[in-house]
């Protein structure tokens, strides 16, 4: 049953038009399209901001945000899974529900605010 579900998920995932498009454009994930839509509607990420990306891997939103905040801003990314490095993104490996992770995030944030 578990194999059937994961095979179904994989076939759904790879036939998804946003997954195909994100591969073509070399984005890290299809999530890029979601944040782009939010940004275009609400302009939430501005140059110079410090952005916290919780559950950041594989890094679609982090990469997008780092380009929007520019070099005067910073992205702090956190995930329980590893993430390949992105310029101007400080990655913290950890569970957001654990105190130690929050402590690490606060320590990095202090440097940029
Ligand atoms: C859908 S993915 C996020 C995709 C990402 N926003 C992007 O733009 O590429 C959700 C992520 O949340 C992470 N995650 C789930 N629970 C978490 C937790 N308690 N603490 C930190 N990360 C968590 C998962 O490891 C996974 O990488």
Image: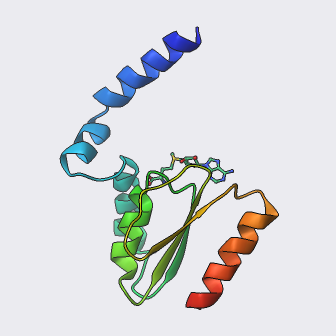
Q: Position of residue 85 (x, y in %)?
A: 41, 63
The answer to whether residue 9 is above or below residue 107 is above
The quarter of the picture where residue 70 lies is: bottom left
Q: Quadrant of the N terminus?
A: top right
Looking at the image, the residue that sits furthest to the left is: 24
Q: Residue at x 52, y 52 (%)?
A: 82
Classify residue 4 as left or right of residue 113: left
110 horizontally vs 28: left or right: right
Residue 47 locus on image (x, y percent): 39, 85
Name, please, the residue furthest toward the right.
Answer: 99
Looking at the image, which residue is at 72% across and 65% down? 101
- x, y percent for residue 26: 24, 51
Q: Pick whichever, 110 or 5, lies toward us.
A: 110
Report the residue at 32% width, 32% height from top: 16
The part of the image, by quadrant, that contains residue 23 is top left
Height in image: 106 above or below 6? below
Tally of numbered tags: 0
């Amino acid at each position: 049953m578990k194999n059937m579900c994961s095979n179904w998920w994989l076939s759904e995932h790879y036939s998804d038009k946003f997954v195909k498009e994100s591969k073509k454009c070399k984005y890290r994930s299809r999530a890029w399209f979601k944040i782009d839509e939010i940004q275009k509607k609400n302009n939430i990420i501005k140059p110079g901001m410090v952005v916290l990306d919780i559950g950041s891997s594989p890094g679609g939103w982090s990469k997008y945000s780092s380009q929007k905040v520019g070099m005067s801003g910073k992205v702090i990314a956190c995930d329980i899974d590893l993430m390949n490095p992105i310029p101007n993104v400080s990655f913290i490996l950890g569970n957001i529900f654990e105190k130690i992770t929050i402590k690490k995030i606060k320590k990095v944030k202090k440097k940029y605010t």
